[in-house]
């Protein structure tokens, strides 16, 4: 009996040892097994020919800007505009006391009338003296003197008429009118003040700036200017000196390029201090939103080039560099540093770093386990640009 019990216990002990040994081997094998490959989606960078738009800061400038100054001196009698309003060319802005100028006109008219009478008298004397001179009753010297008197009287009449025109012109200038259409500033001189006129030192009364159309000035770096010049010589982009290349502008509170214009001027020399070339575009401004002096961002047509595009979500930062994670032929994650360009069709332009045959991880990159050197299970995907209407 005891022998049977001992044999049975030996069998149970052997079975238990075998069972435990099997679990230990399985757990050890599990610990030594390689980790599972993480699934990721990969795609080749999108090769596409895009239109380049180079961006620059600049500000709007009025096409026409005029300082309103009087041409004659006198006291301001009346101001005819409200500060900051729109005015049209020819609108009456200021009235200078006209009485001195009206008196000058009246005097000039009297001088003309008196001289006209003298001309008539001199002409009649010449007419009466002509037969006398022919009959030798009057000497030729005296006849020549009468003709000279007539010529002098006629010349004086012309001078008096010119003085009358000058006086009438000064009377007209007593009304200061808007030389251009646009928005006027506040008045610099109130009614009752004495202002000085003339060519030099005339008193500033107000300023007017035109609004439609409006200019936008900006500076292009020397490197960009040389690039545009080489594109022109290669026939890939027309010069903005000869062609109204398209431009776009967005204001500080705008997310889209809402305003379209065209180039209309490129300076004739590089700025020696800043090593930049000044360019200028022109925009329609029917609603008056674009205001002289306002800063904005301009996008200039820079030609067309073949580029590689990747989604922004596939780009990660590595200290000061930008990289994309790629999968090599052994399905191992490999980082590649890249240089980024602008956005195009919702994708990021890669200026350098890629050849075009790399398998870029576009989904699954957020997994913290996806690191360089990790083996993954890639699935093929595609990179597509966003079509905008």
Image (cartoon, rainbow, N blue to C red):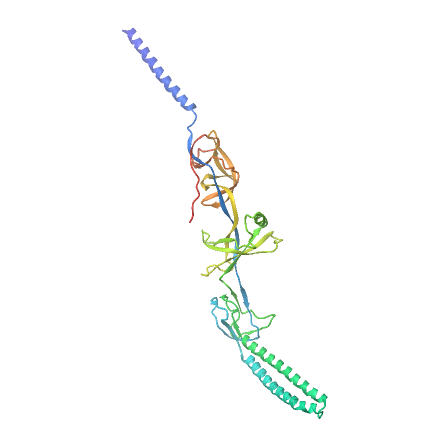
Residue 388 vs residue 317, the one in the foreground: 388
Q: What percent of the width, then of the height, locates residue 90?
A: 50, 71
Question: From the viewer's perspective, is 324 left or right of 157?
Answer: left
| Above or below 144: residue 50 | above
Residue at position x 47%, y 55% in the image: 259
Residue at position x 49%, y 45% in the image: 50
Check the image and name the residue furthest to the bottom. 137
Dividing the picture into quadrants, the one containing residue 71 is bottom right
Please give the count of numbered marks on the rendered protein: 0
| Above or below 361: residue 111 | below
| Above or below 201: residue 290 | above
Residue 157 vs residue 369, the one in the foreground: 157
Q: What percent of the width, then of the height, locates residue 359?
A: 47, 35
Question: From the viewer's perspective, is 243 left or right of 118?
Answer: left
Residue at position x 36%, y 15% in the image: 18
- Classify the position of the N terminus by image quarter: top left
Check the image and name the residue furthest to the left. 1
Residue 364 vs residue 48, the one in the foreground: 48
Q: What percent of the width, then of the height, locates residue 60?
A: 51, 58
Q: What percent of the width, then of the height, locates residue 227?
A: 57, 48
Dividing the picture into quadrants, the one containing residue 108 is bottom right
Question: From the viewer's perspective, is 234 left or right of 389?
Answer: right
């Amino acid at each position: 009996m005891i022998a049977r019990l001992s044999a049975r216990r030996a069998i149970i002990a052997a079975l238990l040892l075998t069972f435990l040994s099997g679990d230990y081997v399985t757990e050890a094998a599990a610990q030594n097994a390689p980790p599972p490959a993480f699934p990721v989606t990969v795609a080749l960078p999108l090769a596409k020919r895009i239109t380049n738009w180079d961006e620059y800061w600049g500000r709007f400038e009025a096409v026409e800007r005029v300082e309103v100054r009087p041409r004659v001196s006198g006291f301001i009698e009346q101001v005819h505009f409200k500060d900051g309003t729109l005015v049209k060319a020819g609108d009456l802005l200021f009235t200078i006391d006209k009485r001195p100028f009206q008196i000058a006109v009246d005097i000039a008219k009297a001088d003309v009338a008196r001289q006209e009478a003298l001309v008539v008298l001199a002409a009649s004397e010449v007419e009466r003296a002509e037969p006398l001179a022919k009959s030798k009753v009057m000497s030729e010297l005296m006849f020549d003197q009468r003709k000279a008197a007539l010529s002098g009287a006629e010349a004086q009449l012309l001078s008096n008429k010119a003085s009358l025109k000058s006086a009438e012109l000064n009377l007209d200038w007593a009304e200061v009118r808007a030389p251009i259409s646009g928005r006027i500033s506040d008045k610099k001189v109130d009614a009752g003040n004495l202002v000085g006129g003339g060519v030099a030192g005339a008193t500033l009364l107000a300023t007017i700036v035109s609004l439609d159309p409006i200019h936008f000035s900006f500076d292009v770096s020397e490197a960009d200017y040389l690039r545009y010049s080489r594109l022109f010589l290669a026939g890939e982009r027309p010069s903005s000196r000869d062609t109204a290349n398209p431009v776009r502008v967005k204001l500080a509170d705008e997310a889209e390029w809402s305003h379209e214009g065209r180039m209309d001027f490129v300076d004739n020399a590089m700025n020696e201090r800043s090593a930049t070339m000044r360019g200028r575009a022109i925009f329609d401004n029917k609603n008056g939103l674009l205001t002289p002096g306002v800063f904005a961002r301009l996008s200039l047509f820079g030609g067309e080039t073949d580029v590689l595009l990747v989604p922004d979500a596939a780009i990660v930062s590595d200290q000061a560099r930008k990289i994309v994670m790629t999968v090599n032929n052994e399905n191992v994650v490999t980082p590649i540093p890249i240089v980024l360009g602008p956005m195009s069709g919702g994708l990021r332009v890669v200026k350098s770093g890629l050849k075009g045959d790399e398998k870029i991880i576009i989904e699954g990159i957020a997994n913290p386990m996806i690191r360089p050197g990790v083996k993954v299970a890639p699935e093929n995907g595609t990179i597509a640009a966003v079509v905008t209407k």
